[in-house]
Image (spheres, grey):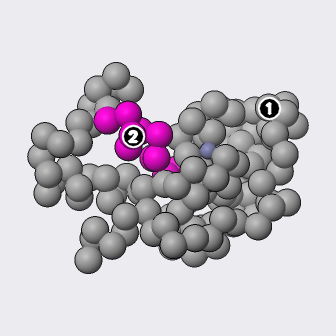
Amino acid sequence: MPSLTEKRGLLARDGFHCRFCGIPLVRSETRSLIRTVFPGALRWGSLNSEQHAGFQALWLQYDHLIPHARGGTNEPSNMVVTCAPCNNGRSNLTLEEAGLLDPRLREPRLTHWDGLERFRA
Ligand SMILES: [Zn+2]
């Protein structure tokens, strides 16, 4: 996993949208804070079936373009911000093996969406 400093750099570059599909995203730390403030409103268990479907889909993750298991590093050039479905769906496949275009060929989708970071203020 990337360090906190590496994660901050990726968020500054990629914003809070999946670099593959463009869906808006929320960091797990922000989701946890929302759960603390609104207990019971946001289910989050260890199984997918026990997790709030909306927040599961919006789960911000950090993905290695060359999979870590195949020698990929945490260098920013090898990492992108992704949603859970894009990250988990590709697993340890290369972009070519998964039939995906390289997301680095498109500019990051930087919009007004802040990943609900304003909730942390
Ligand atoms: Zn995605």
Q: Quadrant of residue 81?
A: bottom right
Report whether 4 appears left or right of 63: left
Q: Quadrant of the C terminus?
A: bottom left
What crowding class fits label 2: few (fewer than 14 Cα within 10 Å), some (14-19), or many (20 or more)?
few
Report whether 112 appears left or right of 90: left
Q: Position of residue 56 (x, y in %)?
A: 41, 39
Q: Position of residue 71 (x, y in %)?
A: 75, 45
Q: Give the magenta range.
A: 52-62
Is ligand 1 less than 8 Å from the beta carbon at label 2?
no
What crowding class fits label 1: few (fewer than 14 Cα within 10 Å), some (14-19), or many (20 or more)?
few
Label 1: element kind: helix
Label 2: element kind: helix
Q: Position of residue 34 (x, y in %)?
A: 23, 55
Could you tell me how far apart the alpha carbons at marks 2 and 1 are, in whole angstroms? 25 Å
- Residue found 34% across the figure and 22% down from its top: 49
Query: Is residue 62 visible in the rendered structure shown here?
Result: no
Query: Is residue 33 visible in the rendered structure shown here?
Result: yes
- Residue found 37% across the figure and 64% down from its top: 116
Q: Position of residue 72 (x, y in %)?
A: 73, 49
Say which residue label 2 marks. Answer: 54
Say which residue label 1 marks. Answer: 98
Report whether 21 appears left or right of 6: right
- Residue found 39% across the figure and 40% down from its top: 54
